[in-house]
Image: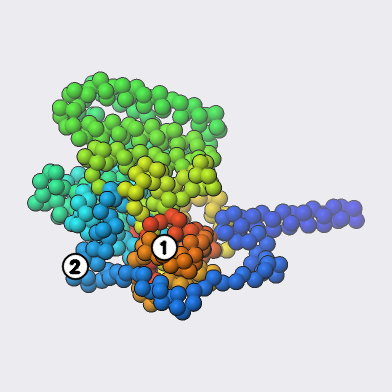
Amino acid sequence: MTPKFKRRLKRTSIVVVILFILITRFFASSVLGEPFFGETITNLFSAKEEPNLLSPEDLGMLKNAIHPITIENAINDSLQFDLLNEKLKNVEVIGLGEATHGTKEFFEIKNKMFKYLVEKQDVKLFGIEANFAACYDINKYILTGEGNAKEALSRNGYWVWQSQEVLNLIEWMKDYNKDKTSNQKIQFYGYDMQDATSCVIWLENYLRKNSPSFDKNLLPEKIEENKAALGDLDDKALDEMQRTNLNKLENLEEFVLSQEIELFKQDSTDYKFAKQTIAVLRQKLNYFREQDFNTAFSFRDSSMTQNIKWIRESNNNGKIMLWAHNGHIGKGTFSEDFKSGNWMGSHLNNLYGKKYFNIGFSFSEGGFVAQSPSSTNILYLMYSFTKSIFNDEPWPVSNNYVKPHSKSYLTNAFSQMNTPIFYIDFKDIEYNKKLKDFINKDYEHYEAGAVYINEKSALWSTNLYKYFDAIIYVDKTKPAENFNLGKIAK
């Protein structure tokens, strides 16, 4: 080996090592939420942050503003929510969030709140962040008792709702409807639009059953059934796929309209549902090629808003309770001007104004269910993360746990209330400048959707005061009783 070759090899090795370090740090920064140069180096050159704390006197005033909630052994669940009677008097759309998609207490509280809303607020409609057509069988079970609740729930399109807590709510809704007239019955809807397959399957079953002249070739593709093949297509082929399926959908819609008299006569409710399923399928096909993050999320959330609007209008503009992640429920945006991308809560606020009331959920520590990698080693994470995206091989569903975070100053203050679960309405503290100024800030707090990697990646910086009308805080949480534990989510 010549000296010249040795020098070249040394320089190449140094370049490779530097590139490797940069790539791993970029991954840690963009995916895990860590500082680019790591915590230790960053702290050496950063000014020490002054913690934002409340005085003992202010903590006492905060304590006076909260309302304890009990979820275990409550004699009358409705009584503890009577504090909302006046606040919800003129509200028609109530959004209930969740800081994770897998927390037992969040689910149980929302179950109890829905029962209160049905019994005391004349709410007849329940909507969840799940695929529109995929929830049809759940609603049919609730209305008629036909079918199997767990099987219907397993087909809702999202594994996160396949839990005992959601199943319990479905069974309660079915039992509630037993002795009710048709206009007194409560209903269960999904309002999301990310899944084409469930729409296509529902339309095929409906039209095959009710229209002798139906041709299966009218149906668009079940896009989600072959994700691996989609990954092999270039942009031109994907754009052509979108055009082809939108054209097929237009022809399908013309066929359904041509059969309107007969289909409406057989079942007017199902006919209206079929027309909206076509609208939802069109939303999905238009969303399919959105590649900008802000535009895609805002399109999805504005579409969900339109689906909620349809659900209400199809049911005499009845009151509805919505169940979704904090992000969707929140009156938030991806941009300062509320133009380039808004969450569903902002769209609902624009549509309904003060008739929309939202309650977020927050917690300090504890467990929840999410898809998680088997190791947090940076090299394994880079490998498995890339594999999960490009080969559609998601992580298994597992129970996860987080400890209180030292910089989550708001939840740390909430934890000092020594009240396991409580409700706080932000209007109740508007008169108190110190409390309002303390709460009305961006703070880090835990927010986990369907995926969790580590504590750092689950920290969101959010101004809860601006996002929500009220908050329900749970100090220590437990994982939901999800049926998918240990399995690969589908």
Mark drawn on residue 17: none
Q: Residue at x 37, y 29 (%)?
A: 220
Residue 137 x/y as whole percent: 23, 44
Which residue has dot 1 on it? 430
Residue 206 at least partly seen: no
* Kind of element beneath mark 1: loop
| Residue lying farthest to the right in this orientation | 3
Q: Residue at x 34, y 49 (%)?
A: 354
Residue 359, quarter of the rendered image: bottom left
Left or right: residue 5 versus residue 180 is right
Residue 446 x/y as whole percent: 47, 63
Residue 440 at least partly seen: yes
Which residue has dot 2 on it? 76
Residue 383, quarter of the rendered image: bottom right
Q: Residues within 10 Å of mark 1 (few under 14, many from 20)?
A: few
Residue 214 x/y as whole percent: 26, 24
